[in-house]
Image (tube, rainbow, N blue to C red):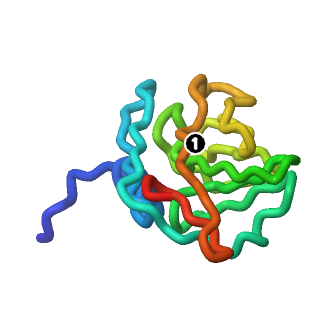
Amino acid sequence: MPARSSASRRTVLRGAAVAPVAGLGLAACSAPGEQAASAATSSVELGAEGEVAKGTAKLYRDHGVVVSRDAAGDLKAYSLVCTHAGCVINKLRGTTLVCPCHGSEFDAVTGKVVQAPATEPLAELPVKVSDGRIVAGPAA
């Protein structure tokens, strides 16, 4: 008879949710009620500069990053790790990020919380344009 895994469904799902974030070297581990830890360890090229127009935002799910451009044309990048329970945000509605776990919402242009239960803003990441490409992470 095969041995049963002691991993809970929640543990497996949390591990699967964090996997896409590995592309940017972000880590997300927290228990409910604790703030997620997120620290970029390397920079990554995300896409063409023209992919993010003024007043819009774009999810780069494979890298765990959202990039936005404000009305003045300045780029901002934020981790997709929700600061409430460490879930990975996977939905962008206009410039509002929506966390699938508990419904927290964040402004993709400022990183600020616009709907609880999260109380802390998203972690901002350095971002720049290099040779017409958007690059995010510590070396950006």
From the viewer's side, name the closer residue of 20 and 8.
Answer: 20
Q: Can residue 94 be seen in this view?
A: no
- Left/right of residue 79 with respect to residue 33 in the rendered view: right
Q: Residue at x 72, y 70 (%)?
A: 49
Q: Residue at x 71, y 53 (%)?
A: 75
Q: Is residue 108 visible?
A: yes
Could you tell me residue 89's position as x and y percent? 60, 50
Dividing the picture into quarters, in which one does residue 58 lie? bottom right
Crowd rating for badge 1 (residues with CA inside 10 Å; few <14, some 14–19, many 20+) = few
- Left/right of residue 124 with respect to residue 68 in the rendered view: left
Could you tell me residue 136's position as x and y percent? 54, 59
Tag count: 1
Q: Mark 1 points at which residue?
A: 101
Q: Which residue is drawn at 52% across and 34% down?
A: 83
Q: Residue at x 39, y 60 (%)?
A: 42
Image quarter of the N terminus: bottom left
Disc 1 marks which amino acid? Cys
Could you tell me residue 132's position as x and y percent? 68, 75
From the viewer's side, name the closer residue of 120 and 8.
Answer: 120
* In the image, farthest residue toward the front: 131
- Left/right of residue 48 with respect to residue 64 in the rendered view: right
Element carrying mark 1: loop
- Would you place residue 53 above or below residue 14 in this image? below
- Left/right of residue 9 with respect to residue 126 in the rendered view: left
- Would you place residue 84 above or below residue 13 in this image? above
Dividing the picture into quarters, in which one does residue 25 lie? bottom left
Could you tell me residue 138's position as x and y percent? 44, 53
- Would you place residue 47 above or below residue 104 in this image? below
Dividing the picture into quarters, in which one does residue 107 lie? top right
